[in-house]
Image (tube, rainbow, N blue to C red):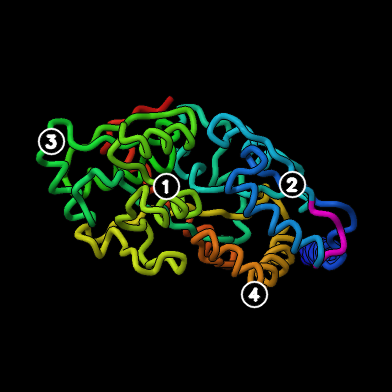
Amino acid sequence: MLIKTDGYIISAVALLSTALAHAADFPERPVRMIVPYAPGAGQDITGRLLAQRLTDAWSQQVVVDNRPGAGSNIGSEMGARAPADGYTLLLANEAMAINATLTRKLPFDPQRDLAAISLIVINPRIFVVHPGVPAKDIKELVAFARTKAGGVSYGSSGVGTGPHLAAALLASMAKVEMTHVPYKGVAPAMTDLLGGQLHLIVSTILSAMPHIQSNKLRGLAVTTTKRSAALPSVPTVAESGVPGYEATAWSMLMAPAPTPRALITRIHASTARAIDNADVRKRYAAEGGEAVGSAPEAASKFLVTEIQRWAKVIKEAGLRPE
């Protein structure tokens, strides 16, 4: 019995040694990074910047593979079902946390089928209103909404998207009525806001900045817990009368869950170094983002928190899984 046990120990040590050796040599061929959005989208820009830095670090090409569709579920499922050898990575975002509740039959489990490698960047969104709205901050917006039947109207890129739920969270926490107008994309919603057909939208800072600078729109507050370096004069929603409010956009690098721990550690180390690069941080900051580079454990806890946060918002907003 002792000999058999020793055999198991020797086998385990041998397997561990082999895994460590593979991790040390990784990567020996090109790596695929699945981005579940179309080329040119914000998530695609984030992924390509990281992919280039990892390509430089590894001397192996990291190829961005755009797989849009089904609110990011198509690409995310591909990432979850890929071989667990480190050669297929997934750049997930907050849609994964939302879809965990909003998609009736999600074909994968974000916590069971995927392993977090690192939280890459956190991006604030911003509440922007048409200049005709008599509100200079969130407190005044809430007061204005209470004077109107149906509250204020806000547009988004679709039901259950991050911008939709960010506004729904404000309505829930401030206990004010707001009317959601879904569009087939951000561009038509922004066009109607500029034309005065909507009162507000929750936008990315990158999209809203030119309109704020030209005084075509007014920025009321950002959705993160800290002000954005890109718009330091704009307060957070939390400091504007709704304490505890937070609704971030984010990007997280992930791998199939069975990926060996040694490989996860190796990929995280390279990713953290890439994100710590001054040029990378500057690029993300220009879009209003904050580079993170968190450890796998912290990224995993963050994902759980986000899933729980949006499950509550979805329930309170009365949205049904589709």
Callout in the foreground (4, 2): 4
Give the secondary structure at mark 2.
Answer: strand
Q: Is residue 140 magenta?
A: no
The residue at the point 73 percent across, 56 percent down is 51
Local packing at callout 2 (Cα closer than 10 Å; few below 14, some 14-19, many 20+) is many
How far across and how far down the image is residue 168, in percent? 29, 41
> What's the amino acid at mark 1?
Ser
Q: How far apart are the alpha carbons under marks 1 and 3?
A: 23 Å
Residue corresponding to mark 4: 278
Earlier residue among tags 2 and 3: 2
Q: Nearer the viewer, mark 3 or mark 4?
A: 3
Q: Which residue is mark 3?
A: 148
Say left or right for 81 vs 304.
right
As drawn, 315 above or below 129: above
N-terminal label among 4 and 2: 2
Q: Position of residue 147 (x, y in %)?
A: 9, 40
Mark 1 or mark 2, which has the lower sequence index?
Answer: 2
Q: Badges 4 and 1: C-beta atoms under 8 Å apart?
A: no
Whether pointer 3 and pointer 4 mark residues with C-beta atoms closer than 8 Å, the reply is no
Q: Amino acid at mark 3?
A: Lys
Marks 1 and 3, the one that precedes in the sequence? 3
Residue on which the image places disc 1:
203
Please tell me which residue is depicted at 11% across the width and 41% down the height of the picture. Answer: 146
Identified by mark 2, the residue type is Val
Give the secondary structure at mark 1: strand
Region in magenta? 57-62
CA distance for labels 4 and 1? 26 Å
Closer to the chain start, of discs 4 and 1, is 1
Find disc 2 in the rendering and name its residue.
Answer: 64
